Image (cartoon, rainbow, N blue to C red):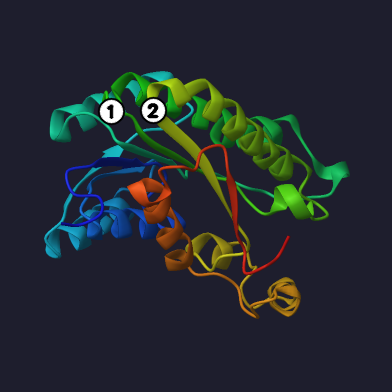
Amino acid sequence: MKKLENKVAVITGASKGIGAGIAKHLAAAGASVVVNYASAKGGADAVVAEIVSKGGKAIAVQANVSNEADVTRLFDETKKAFGAVDILVNNAGVYKFGAIEAITPEDFHNQFDINVLGLLLTTQGAVKNFNPNGGSIINIGSVVSSIAPVGSSIYTATKGAVDAITHVLAKELGGKKIRVNSINPGMVETEGTHTAGFIGSDFEAETTRTTPLGRIGQPDDIADVAVFLASDDSRWLTGDILLASGGVR
């Protein structure tokens, strides 16, 4: 029997990058997967098609995680397709780096709305729909909350908030048998890091040089940790922040 057989998992921001990798790995481990996306329908449909082609179960559901009505619909669609939720992966996130002089209120609200408010709303929605036996919430933070890179004031603040929320909700939801942990990746090669110009840059070279394991991450590196946290293998872990950064801290 597969580790996540008969489990239902919702992964936000799963049309590409780390989220897509996690969706595929959870499905391969036996979970029925809901691939959430905000606007990239084509990417989400491709993730679902790949999962289904390999014998897995998946659907794509559009929802802006910072919109309460959208989040309600996300879990209504999940319940209709698969039933109660066992696993929530709060992966949806945005980032924009810039000097303090360049920060605008719009930058602040965009990043906090998705990275923090979105996480809270989807967690709220999941808790209402969780299996009575409990389950696992996996937040995707970032190593930036530890290393605090220059030019990342807003983004680092959002990921520091994710760390804090993880600790709080682990205590708050423990009585419901819901575990809450966070994976904090270092630099990972994704469509987003390519679009942002990080891949192939001096920043990537310096990151590789200062990473003890000598490379940047791949989505599979993070997805395997997510499978562990989603499964009973991690049954005694809650409130933990797992740095998945190749040793960067």
What is the C-alpha distance between the residues marked 1 and 2?
7 Å
**Could you say which disc has been placed on residue 177 in the image?**
2
Asked if residue 155 can be seen in this view, the reply is yes
Q: Amino acid at mark 1?
A: Asn
Q: Position of residue 91 (x, y in %)?
A: 47, 45
Between discs 1 and 2, the one toward the N terminus: 1
Report the front residue among 180 and 109.
180
Q: On the rendered structure, is 77 left or right of 104?
A: left
Q: On the rendered structure, is 26 left or right of 79?
A: right
The residue drawn where x is 45% and y is 64% is: 219
The residue drawn where x is 38% and y is 28% is: 177
Q: Position of residue 212 (x, y in %)?
A: 70, 76
Q: Amino acid at mark 2?
A: Lys
Report the front residue among 249 and 23.
249
Q: Position of residue 169 (x, y in %)?
A: 54, 26
The residue drawn where x is 20% and y is 59% is: 51
Vertical position of residue 126 compared to residue 98: above or below: above
Sort mark 1 into few (<14), some (14-19) or many (20+) by Cα contacts within 10 Å.
few
The residue drawn where x is 30% and y is 51% is: 44
**Could you say which disc has been placed on residue 133 in the image?**
1
Name the quadrant containing residue 125: top left
